[in-house]
Amino acid sequence: MAIIGARIDNRLLHGIVATSWAPDSGATRVMVIDDDVANDPQKKQAMKLGRPSGMAVSIITKETALTNFSNHKYDRQKVFIISQTPDVFLNLLEQGEKIDKLVLGGTLTFDNAIKVTKRAYIKPEQVDIYRAILDRGCKIVSQYVPQDDSVDVAKILNSKKAGA
């Protein structure tokens, strides 16, 4: 089964993810892929406190995630992945993992960023990564909470002629 949910969120595992996104997905494991948090024992322990009820939590580096997926470690699990950056998801897709939909949740604001929603922005240098994800058949939408209407990120990128 493997990846059943994928989300970009600058706060990683927090209340909305733990109480809405992960449970609604039917996941058995929530996976935070973030080198900074994975390599900082205090941050890692604090984030584990947000574990959704009844789910396993992994907080690992990108390298560990790619290795574990390539070794089929999660094949019998339903994994909901959260990362702060789109490159993690592109790397998983390039490795042959299947991700049907990537949700762009909350991000920080950046200079010259493309505004997708009032809470989600794409850095100019990430545009090619988002396009490569789309080219691999993964739909990208922006939603802060599951109840929000989804915004098609491909339409935003195409309308902005971003990176052209």
Image (cartoon, rainbow, N blue to C red):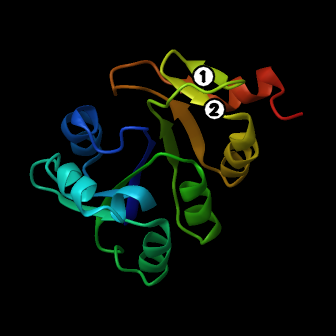
Between the residue at mark 2 and the residue at mark 1, the CA separation in whole angstroms equals: 7 Å
Residue 12 drawn at (x, y percent): 35, 44
Residue 134's place in the image compared with 124, above or below, is below
Quadrant housing residue 48: bottom left
Q: Number of numbered discs present?
A: 2
Direction from residue 25 to residue 137 in the image, left or right: right
Residue at left offset 60%, top offset 64%: 91
Of all residues shown, which one is farthest toward the left?
A: 53
The residue that mark 2 highlights is 122
Q: Residues within 10 Å of mark 2 (few under 14, many from 20)?
A: many
Look at label 1 and name its amino acid.
Val
Look at label 2 and name its amino acid.
Ile
Residue 22 drawn at (x, y percent): 27, 44
Of callouts 2 and 1, the N-terminal one: 1
Residue 34 visible here: no
Of all residues shown, which one is farthest toward the right?
A: 164
Residue 47 visible here: yes
Residue 119's place in the image compared with 73, above or below, is above
Q: Nearer the viewer, mark 2 or mark 1?
A: 2
Considering the image in quadrants, where does the C terminus appear? top right
- Tags 2 and 1 in contact by the CB under 8 Å rule? yes
Determine which of the numbered discs, if any, sits on residue 134 in the image: none
Residue at left offset 10%, top offset 54%: 54
The residue that mark 1 highlights is 116
Direction from residue 43 to residue 91 in the image, left or right: right
